[in-house]
Amino acid sequence: MTIQVLVAPVVVAQAPGETLLAVLLYVVLGLLVAAGVGAAVATLRVILPGLANAADGALRDTRGRRLFLVGVLPLLGVALLTQLVAQTNQQTLGTLVGVLLLVPTGLLIVLGLLAALPHLGERLLERERPRSPLARAVGGGVALGLAATTMWMPPFFALLLLLLGGWLLGIGLLTALGRRSPVVP
Amino acid sequence: MPPAMHQPDLPPGPPDPYESQSGHDDLVVRALGLEGLYACPPALLAAILAEQTRPAWSLGRRALALAAGVLLAVGSVTALTGRLPSTDTPLLPALSAAPGVLQRADVLPTADLLAQAPPIDGRLAPFAAALAAVLLAGGVLLARRWGAANHERARETL
């Protein structure tokens, strides 16, 4: 396996310096956006405390493997279905799948983010002194943003995207569907 | 004849939550209770029915909440951009006003990575669709099962 398989070749056009500058600017902008997402999550947690507590509960009470399994299975299903629909080139079908499948999946991932970002911030930033909810969420967002720079290492990024997406979707699904349901024997 | 029926001054039993709504004679209800039999007042029947149909109501309420969320998301994007959301809608509209160096999408390899996904053979498409449906349904069923177990555990802890 050559290094070119592991690391995506940055397209070198006429001006290599310009390409490097663009990459750096994208990274800086991406980190700012990631911190902004963290702040937005902290704000949403204040606006929707019930939903945030439910998401926290789903994350706290579910074992890691179950979270991954609950999220990764539908994520693969959605990806497969999206690929199939994209191949058919039918506008109506695409809109239908987008509204019925992609938007709910996105919302569930946002629901998962409500619990996941502060959890990441807490686990990664805190040692002895507890941090504020905003610092936790922004810290988690920045950690995720830094993790996203692996997009220049496609195989690792694909794995990370699958596991992270599955984790977030798992939290969202367990929050949305898991509460107050009867126990299935 | 049980001895309880011969006692004129029956000691008061535990409070019956449905007593006031039962519409039955109190003495009869208590005598039946001593025999291990209970009348089935309408309130109790309603409670049993509500308990049994709660999962269906709960699922319907969640589906409604999700539909409202979808409407809100699509509506807000439409209101912001002035058109229905599509893949052409830029993720960061402010980027179009950024310097040219930031508008070079070719430095982000993610789009290439996704575009390199192999197309699914037409003959395999139905099987792939069935597999996708199974994966989706499996995830949803597992979420309901394990989520309910979480809730039950939390209730027992309380």
Image (tube, coloured by chain):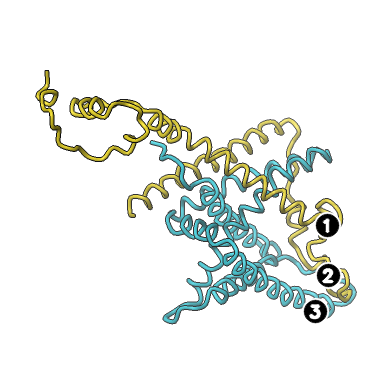
Chain colours: A cyan, B yellow
Please name the residue shown 76% across and 40% down the image: A96
Crowd around label 2: few <14 · some 14–19 · many ≥20 (10 Å) = few
Q: Chain of mark 3?
A: A
Q: Which residue is mark 2?
A: B95
Amino acid on which disc 3 is placed: Leu
Q: Is residue B20 left or right of residue B91?
A: left
Residue linked to disc 1: B89
- At numbered mark 3, what does the secondary structure look like: helix, strand or loop? helix
Calculate the distance from the C-alpha at mark 1 to the C-alpha at mark 2.
Answer: 12 Å
Secondary element at image label 1: loop
Q: Residue B67 location, x and y as percent?
A: 67, 45
Amino acid on which disc 2 is placed: Leu
Q: Position of residue A176 (x, y in %)?
A: 55, 49
* Quadrant in the rendering for residue A100: top right
Nearer to me, B95 or B103? B95
Q: CA distance from mark 2 to mark 3?
A: 16 Å
Viewer-nearest of discs 2 and 3: 2
Q: Quadrant of the C terminus of chain B?
A: bottom left
Question: Mark 1 belongs to which amino acid?
Answer: Thr
What residue is drawn where x is 47% and y is 50%?
A: A66
Determine crowd level at label 1: few under 14, some 14-19, many 20+ residues with C-alpha closer than 10 A. Answer: few
> For mark 3, what is the residue?
A21
Secondary structure beneath disc 2? helix
